[in-house]
Amino acid sequence: MAGQDEHKVELDVGDSIDQERLVRHNERIRTEDEQRRHADMELQAHTAYLRMRLGDFYVRSGKITRAIAEYKRAVKMDQKNGIFRTRLGDSYVLRDMVQQAMDQYRKAIQSDPELSDPRVSLGDVYLRFGMNAEALAQYRVAVNLEPTRAYYRFKLACTCAAVGDMEEGKRQMRAAVSLAPTDAFYRFRLGDLYRRTGQVEEAVAEMSEATQLAPYDGYYLVRYGVVSLGAGRIIEAIDAFRSALELEPHNRCYRVLLADAYSEAGLAEEAAGMLTAAGPLDSYEMQFVGRRRLEMNRAENDAAGAV
């Protein structure tokens, strides 16, 4: 009996060891499976990201169809990634596939409500169809999500101005300028809003700052010259038009505007010579000069009213 009991104990011990080994084995398998699943997820996410970057490359290369294909693959790998869907939507816009783009933007917003880019892109599409109120709503959310993005403030400012809320437009554009004080574009656009609301001196100041930040941009120089001439600052206007003409010596529009400035300064001979050098303008050039002269007259009237 004693021998049988001893043998039974040995069997029990052996069974216990085998069971322990089995448990350890199963735990190791589960751990390895989890590690593999995690590695697979990381690989898939990395691959999806690479697909997106490849799509970005194709967009820069003008190969939009290929870009769409790559973005689609990225979205298929990660259905909930709002960035991938936004990129796909943007590429659809480049192909003028507007409805498909809007679908992607909305899905991106649904999957990640805190993502601002699809809201701005959706707002841009709304603007294309004159849906200013809908665009405005999307831009406001984007600004609330990322209040330090100057470009978002700019988009909101322009849309506010488009719906007639010029004061809010100027406030948002001033915010854009404060966020990007060395960007000439925002300075120029703020100056243009001031011009449109009759604040001539403020317009001149902002456009002057824009020309200092971007001294080789002839368009900024000309617009600054136009506002300056309308405000009675003839010397500043002449200097601005001359600088623009130095950058683009064959631009006939700039010569005509410089002739206007010479006329305002009483320099009839110089004005006549500049008009002769300009020669006849085509229809596009005439429209450009006409718009600038309207701005000039508007600024002149506003400046006179402020005296």
Image (spheres, helix red, strand yellow):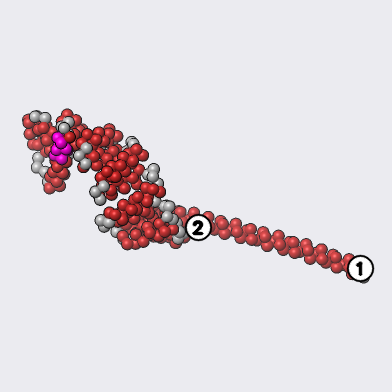
Disc 2: CA contacts within 10 A as few (<14), some (14-19) or many (>=20)? some
Give the residue number, with chain letter if any, for mark 1: 3
Label number found at residue 279? none
Q: Position of residue 125 (x, y in %)?
A: 30, 56
Find the distance from the CA under tag 1 to the CA under tag 2: 61 Å
> Taking 81 as reference, is 172 left or right?
left
Residue 167 within the magenta-colored segment of the rendering: no
Residue 276 in sight here: yes
* Residue 202, above or below 102: above
Q: Is residue 95 above or below residue 289?
A: below
Picture mark count: 2
**Can you tell which of label 1 and label 2 is closer to the viewer?**
1
Instruction: Please check the rendered image and state whether residue 300 is part of the magenta-colored stretch, yes or no.
Output: yes
The range drawn in magenta is 296-305
Tell me residue 71's x, y (percent).
40, 58
Residue matched to label 2: 44
Density class for disc 1 (Cα within 10 Å; few <14, some 14-19, many ≥20) is few
Q: Amino acid at mark 1?
A: Gly
The image quadrant of residue 297 is top left
Q: Main secondary structure of the magenta part?
A: helix
Along the line of sight, which residue is nearer the eye, 133 or 187?
133
Q: Residue at x 35, y 50 (%)?
A: 140
Residue 96 image position (x, y, % from top left): 29, 59
